[in-house]
Amino acid sequence: MKTRKLMTFVAVACCTLVTISCAQQAQTEKSEKLELTTVGNPYMPLWEHIPDGEPYVFEDPDQPGKYRVYVYGSHDDLITMYCGRNQVVWSASVDSLNNWRYDGIILVVDKNAKGEPFDSVGTADVLFAPDVTMTTDANGKKTYWLFPNDQTGYRNGLIAKSDRPDGPFEVCNWSKDNPNQVDGIYGFDPAVFVDDDGRIYGYWGFGHSMAAEIDPATMCTVKPGTKVVDGMIGGYQEPNGGDFRFFEASSMRKIKDKYVFIYSRFTKEGEFGLPTSNYTLAYCYSDNPLGPWTYGGTIIDGRAREKDEQGHVIASAVAHGNTHGSICEINGQWYVFYHRQTGTDEFARQAMVAPIEVKVEEGKGGKVMISEGEYNSCGFALNGLDPFERHSAGIACWLTATKPVIHEYPNNKFFGSYVEAGYGGEPGMSKEEALASKAKYDAPYDIRYNTNRVVNNTDGSIVGYKYFNFDAERMANKGNLMLDLRLIPEGIDGTIEVWMDRPWASQGGKLIGKAALKADMKQTSTDVAISISNEAKEKDLAGKHAIFFVFKSDTKEKSLCILEDFVFLFQGK
């Protein structure tokens, strides 16, 4: 029996609290699944911060004939600013997308062409959003090229190469004239694409889109006899921006005979019923790798557009931030990879994913139609998360309050629930200590490390999860269905309501459970057991459903509790 936590039972009808017996607790714990088979969204461990992810399917060099998805991104480990001084890669078998593996650091740029440090303390360059591509020579040898978006001015166009998709990569375009500089044309957020005929194209830009055909002999300079395309598509502040409204995050894919350019787009003021934002990925398409282009639409909106109880469009997730990513087909299913914001600033971003549909009309002038992905909590678990596995509260995809967030770049002021940034340390560690802790690498999805708390749960806050799959066979269990909600009370009287499908009855939501929080509850990690109504268990819950926690209190603008994690389980059978 767990003795370090208080277990409380909350009756649905009257919300009175009584201590659960040792025998009951033992029965409850036996029904909890300890193995995490549906990891949720973010799909990487919640202590890892990999924004700007570029996904590619490459052959596993250690298992010829087997394939893995590799995600290359920047690394938000500087805590107080974007990105980091290294780049790492995570990968997963195409047949096991809920099991991501840390493949290690693939690049650090801390020495010049002569192997000398850049300064007396060996400071490494800050590396922003990268891209990767692969070339194959006449003998079938594969070379992987990394374009790490080095932020040191005279090393912006730095590139590196490796014989393996998981690195390590070595810089390969040092200038012959200066050992501290590199050759090449790449600017901000480079993307490099190898066409079927072997020709190579590069794309980059910040507010202004640039592109060029690349010399395959260098992989970093303009092909002789060609010119840079200056203003490939319209920028968001440019008079010819049109619907394109390019901001940053260039990425290129080829689907059948169409070229698809994915990028971060600034929406128009009032577009979708919300203020202007660069928290979206959009696409355009062409019959040629350098255009002309036709605007396609939005692939993902990091604000998670929803409607409130009155039917008004709202941002149901963090309303302000940036995103960067691309699309990838894995075993016949297309996904959009992007990132979300956590914490109170933009420096703790996490890798996200959503399934999408892609349709292509082949032939000259044919259309490319990409559906908009849904911002959700289940990620690769297309049928929904397993509710009988303990999940971190931090996979929430719906976080709203009675007042909208105030954004003062790069900070957000929240009036309700938000996901606290976490770095996988032990209790009591500072962010820096947690970041440096190595224990999490041995058990990356262990709930001790793989968690983000949801904090500032004030009156009127709503925290939601899309979706859980309440398998009908397991729901036939004769025991009482419970929700074990692990939280830290914060000395405020109030209630937590549990809703399914929607957080309001007026939109078809159903109240299925309720917990009372008392001001005198001990402010330590506490398991609160919420009894789920028999009607919900027997008639409503079987299948795929969203779950919402709605916080209510007579005390305004004070947090009722900190949410840690939760699991559904059966008691008594």
Image: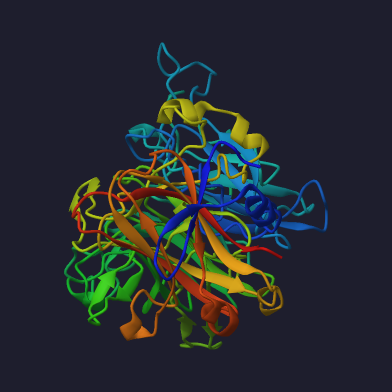
The residue sitting at the right extreme is 64
Residue at (59% x, 37% y) in the render: 3
Left or right: 178 as drawn, with respect to 61 = left
Residue 184 at x, y = what percent? Answer: 44, 42
Residue at (74% x, 58% y) in the render: 67
Residue 145 or residue 281, whichever sits in front: 281
Q: Is residue 531 above or below residue 186?
A: below
Residue 107 at x, y = what percent? Answer: 55, 34
| Quadrant in which the C terminus appears | bottom right
Give residue 43's quadrant in the image. bottom right
Residue 91 or residue 224, whichever sits in front: 91
Q: Is residue 353 above or below residue 156?
A: below
Residue at (50% x, 34% y) in the render: 86
Give residue 440's quadrant in the image. top right
Q: Is residue 365 above or below residue 347?
A: below
Residue at (80% x, 46% y) in the render: 62
